[in-house]
Amino acid sequence: MPSKVIISCAITGSIHTPSMSEYLPVTPEQIARGAIEAAEAGAAILHLHARDPETGAPTPDPNVFMRFLPVIKQNVDAVVNITTGGGLTMTLDERLAAPLAAKPEMCSLNMGSMNFNISPAGGRVKNWKFDWEKPYLDATDNFIFRNTFRDVAGIVERLGKAHGTRFEYECYDTGHLYNLAYCLDQKIVEPPLFVQTIFGILGGIGADPRNLMFMKETADRLFGNDYHWSVLAAGRHQMAFTTMAGILGGNVRVGLEDSLYIGRGQLAKSNAEQVAKIRRILEELSLEIATPTEARAMLKLKGGDRVGF
């Protein structure tokens, strides 16, 4: 078991829409504030998407990212982790525009193409703030999120080998672990791997405790000592699954990208609220929380002084 637990926080994402919660960060100022507060609460890694400041729609625009990335860096020492998943309607080049401009220490990297159906997410919304929201969600029952082996290798080449960026390997199903193992065998990627196993997205593996155990057992078998395991779960499963991960020696991810709630029927008012809750749970279990410096050492990151913002 690792001596300390890395807490990641995913600040806004591209799944939830502004009508679902008034607390979802949308503007660059809100994203920066949410990230800074999450870091101050104990998050060592900040996973970041951008949104159109006017409508809250996901955007790949590097100029929007650059309105909050320097602010975060100037205020906290947390590792900045920029999405390469972007938003569900973006091309691969759009998804990579901001990471290539920012050259961050870490980026997310999805380890396989998949059905990615978030159409049920708007089921409780009665009044939509923006015209784009409902059609965006509804269209995902006919959507395939593309991440081919060639796509993955290209992202690693353009970001990892060119700029020293390392990756949060997002695995939404067991097959994604085998895809990553293939990439490791082919020397496309190199250890230590930061493997984020994801539960509860329709199209990926379900949020069942037995699935969590099976994903960990599979990752242990495939990667041995060459990886650090982390867990996130969508919606109401967030805290239960991250607690299980901590007990089993893993790292955890929370944040408003993954769940809008802090408890049953209670919206989280900030990302920091979720970070503080999982930190409290883990510390009550006698687990220690990793600092950004310790996370960098564990994951062999290049350091915040070698980024492009």
Image (cartoon, helix red, strand yellow):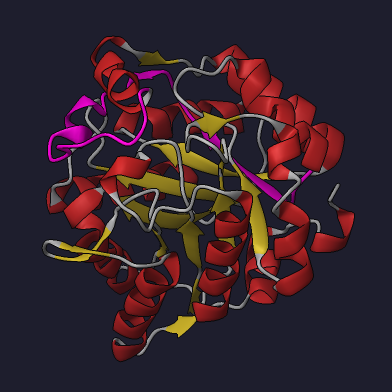
Residue 209 position (above or below residue 175): below
Q: Position of residue 259 (x, y in %)?
A: 29, 53
Residue 43 position (above or below residue 156): below
Q: Quadrant of residue 128?
A: top left
Is there any visible trace of residue 86 in the rendered image?
no
Q: Quadrant of residue 161?
A: top right
Quadrant where the image shows the N terminus: bottom left
Please report the bounds of the magenta region as a residue range.
103-131
Chief secondary structure of the magenta span? loop
**Residue at x 39%, y 64% (from the top left corner):** 250
Q: Position of residue 66 (x, y in %)?
A: 76, 45
The extreme top residue here reads 142
Is there any visible trace of residue 48 in the rendered image?
yes
**Residue at x 40%, y 58% (from the top left corner):** 255
Q: Position of residue 146 (x, y in %)?
A: 47, 15
**Residue at x 34%, y 28% (from the top left corner):** 133
User: Is-magenta flag for residue 194?
Assistant: no
Residue 137 position (above or below residue 174): above
Residue 274 position (above or below residue 3): above
> How many numbered callouts?
0
Which is more toward the observer, 163 or 122?
Answer: 122
**Residue at x 34%, y 67% (from the top left corner):** 269
